[in-house]
Image (spheres, rainbow, N blue to C red):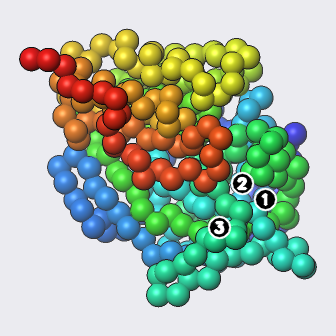
């Protein structure tokens, strides 16, 4: 399914939905709350919005890209790192309008609202257009919505609330993801500096699930095909990362996917490599059988794992 269209507001042809070359990645002028030598943390005011679909494009058997405009033209939206996420809301009122949470003094409640978290795949500050990639699991509310999305359809949104920026101070990068984290990995690849050494490990069902990864980096991509095995039930991704050569400690590892299938990577990177704690992030994007999984388990070690004997 593809609904490439001319945006009547901007007059922009959305044939740029799946570019073959990396785009410039200007960084918005937001000030970090914590600014370290190798990373920075940003916090933003919560702002609910109504998004309107401009166009869609099927990227692979598993991914649909949806381009949005916003009722407030994405006022003050940050564009800083691949860590940026939006909450999207799928409930509507009796008149078909998206239902948004009420925010009072920065506080809000999501109780009773159907919502999911999504990576901001790309935001163009000039055209005020934003892309989100949806995994097409028809059993889920978000994938089902994306399959039938058409220009003019609306969703509620809120965020981002925080962003974690990894600075360009490392000699090499390892990026690892399943389908759910592939949009973030693709943004990582597109924003790495020219000539940076990088290796990607990406778990998908088959070659039909692979996508192009425009980049300026010297990127080696390893596609890991799990076949008919259900997502989140193998250690294929973690095993591939643990086979990587980590003898050079001046690098950064970013891994995201099903929480339990990649949990062992935290222990491995902590106890079996020379990497410091500022050199890696392992992030559970989802957990099998659990809706709206709490990603705050980021960074925790596996409870079953102990340091190796001296």
Q: Is residue 244 left or right of residue 310?
A: right
Q: How far is disc 2 from disc 3 in space, using C-alphas? A: 14 Å
Relative to the observer, which residue lies in front, 213 or 105? 105
The answer to whether residue 163 is above or below residue 303 is below
Viewer-nearest of discs 3 and 1: 3
Residue 4 visible in the displayed image: no
Which residue, as the protein is rendered here, is positioned at the far left?
310
Name the residue that disc number 3 marks: 157
Earlier sequence position, callout 3 versus callout 1: 1
Circle nearer the N terminus (2, 3): 2
Instruction: Say if mark 3 contacts mark 1, CB within 8 Å.
Output: no
Q: Nearer the viewer, mark 2 or mark 3?
A: 3
Q: Which residue is mark 2?
A: 67
Name the residue located 82 percent from the left edge and 52 percent from the top edge: 145
Q: Residue 286's x, y, as percent?
A: 57, 42
Q: Which residue is identified by label 1? A: 54
């Amino acid at each position: 399914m593809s609904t490439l269209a001319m945006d009547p507001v901007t007059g922009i042809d959305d044939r740029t939905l799946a570019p073959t070359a990396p785009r410039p990645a200007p960084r918005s002028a937001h000030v970090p709350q914590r600014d370290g030598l190798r990373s920075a943390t940003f916090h933003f005011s919560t702002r609910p919005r109504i998004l309107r679909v401009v166009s869609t494009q099927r990227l692979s058997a598993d991914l649909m890209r949806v381009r949005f405009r916003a009722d407030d033209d994405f006022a003050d939206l940050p564009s800083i790192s691949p860590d940026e996420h939006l909450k999207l809301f799928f409930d509507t009122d009796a008149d078909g309008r998206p239902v948004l949470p009420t925010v009072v003094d920065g506080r809000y409640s999501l109780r009773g609202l159907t919502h999911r978290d999504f990576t901001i795949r790309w935001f163009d500050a000039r055209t005020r257009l934003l892309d989100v990639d949806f995994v097409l699991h028809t059993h889920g509310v978000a994938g089902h919505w994306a399959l039938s999305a058409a220009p003019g359809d609306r969703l509620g949104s809120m965020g981002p609330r925080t962003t974690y920026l990894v600075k360009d101070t490392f000699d090499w990068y390892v990026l690892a993801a399943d389908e759910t984290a592939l949009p973030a990995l693709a943004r990582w690849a597109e924003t790495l500096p020219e000539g940076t050494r990088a290796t990607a490990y990406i778990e998908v069902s088959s070659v039909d699930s692979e996508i192009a990864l425009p980049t300026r980096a010297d990127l080696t991509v390893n596609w890991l095909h799990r076949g008919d095995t259900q997502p989140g039930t193998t250690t294929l991704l973690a095993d591939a990362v643990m086979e990587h050569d980590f003898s050079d400690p001046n690098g950064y590892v970013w891994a995201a996917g099903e929480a339990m299938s990649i949990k062992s990577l935290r222990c491995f990177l902590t106890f079996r490599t020379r990497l410091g704690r500022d050199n890696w992030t392992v992030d559970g994007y989802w957990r099998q059988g659990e809706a709206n999984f709490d990603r705050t388990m980021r960074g925790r070690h596996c409870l079953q794992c102990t340091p190796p004997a001296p």
